[in-house]
Image (spheres, helix red, strand yellow):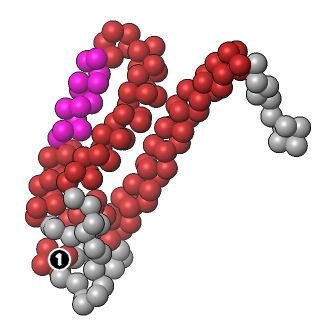
C-alpha cells in the first residue's frame, strides 16, 4: 500500500538522467493558440446552442462564471508550473503532492476528458457539415446519398 502512495520530492521532479527528459517544444503562443482553439471549438460553436436552449439569455452569465472558474484553474496551473518546472502537467503535480495512485487516476481522467472533448467537437462540427451538405444539395442538385455499399 505504501508503494501506491509514494511521492516524488520537488527536487527530483526537475532532475532527469542524461538524454531521458522530454523536450519543451511548445512556447506560450502555442499554448494560447491551443486554449483558444479549445474554447472556440467546444464553447462557441457547439455548446452555445445547448446553453441558450437551457438557460435562455442567462447563458451569458453562465459563460462568465465558467470563464472565472477557468481563470482560477489557469492561475493554479501557472503557480504549479513555476514551482515544478517539469513536463507532465497535472500528472506530475499530483504525483508530487498526493502520490502515485492519485497521479495515475488524474492521468487517466485527463485522457478520458480529452477524448470526450474531441467527441463533442466532432459532433458539433458534423452538425454544421450536414447543414453545409444540405445547402450544397439544394443549390446544385448534387445527389448526396451514401453509396449502397456504405449504407
The reply, left or right, for residue 44 in relation to residue 99 is right
Q: What stretch is highlighted in magenta?
A: 60-72
**118 relative to 17 in the view: left or right:** right
Location of residue 23 with respect to 106 vertically, above or below: below
Say which of 35 and 4 sits in front. 35
Q: Quadrant of the N terminus?
A: bottom left
**For residue 58, side relative to residue 16 (left or right):** right
Percent position of residue 87, x then y: 26, 68
Please check the rendered image and state whether residue 63 is part of the magenta-colored stretch, yes or no: yes
- Residue receiving disc 1: 14
43 falls in the magenta region: no
**Which residue is painted at 22% across and 59% down in the image?**
27
**Relative to 81, is 148 on the left or the right?**
right
Looking at the image, the residue that sits furthest to the right is 148
Q: Quadrant of residue 149?
A: top right
Choose top left, top right, bottom left or bottom right for residue 43. Answer: top left
Vertical arrangement, residue 113 with respect to residue 22, above or below: above
Q: Who's the residue at 17% across and 41% down the image?
A: 72
Q: Is residue 45 visible?
A: yes
Name which residue lies at 19% across and 32% down: 68
* Element at label 1: helix
Q: Position of residue 92 (x, y in %)?
A: 26, 67
- Give the quadrant of the C terminus: top right
Amino acid at each position: 500500500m505504501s508503494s501506491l502512495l509514494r511521492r516524488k520530492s520537488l527536487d527530483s521532479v526537475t532532475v532527469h538522467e542524461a538524454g531521458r527528459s522530454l523536450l519543451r517544444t511548445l512556447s506560450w503562443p502555442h499554448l494560447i493558440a491551443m486554449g483558444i482553439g479549445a474554447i472556440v471549438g467546444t464553447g462557441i460553436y457547439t455548446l452555445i446552442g445547448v446553453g441558450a436552449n437551457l438557460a435562455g439569455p442567462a447563458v451569458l452569465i453562465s459563460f462568465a462564471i465558467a470563464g472565472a472558474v477557468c481563470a482560477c484553474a489557469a492561475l493554479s496551473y501557472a503557480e504549479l508550473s513555476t514551482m515544478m518546472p517539469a513536463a507532465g502537467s497535472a500528472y506530475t503535480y499530483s504525483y508530487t503532492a498526493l502520490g502515485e495512485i492519485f497521479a495515475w487516476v488524474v492521468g487517466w481522467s485527463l485522457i478520458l476528458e480529452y477524448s470526450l472533448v474531441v467527441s463533442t467537437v466532432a459532433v458539433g462540427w458534423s452538425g454544421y457539415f450536414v447543414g453545409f451538405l444540405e445547402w450544397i444539395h439544394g443549390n446544385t442538385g448534387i445527389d448526396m446519398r451514401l453509396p449502397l455499399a456504405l449504407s
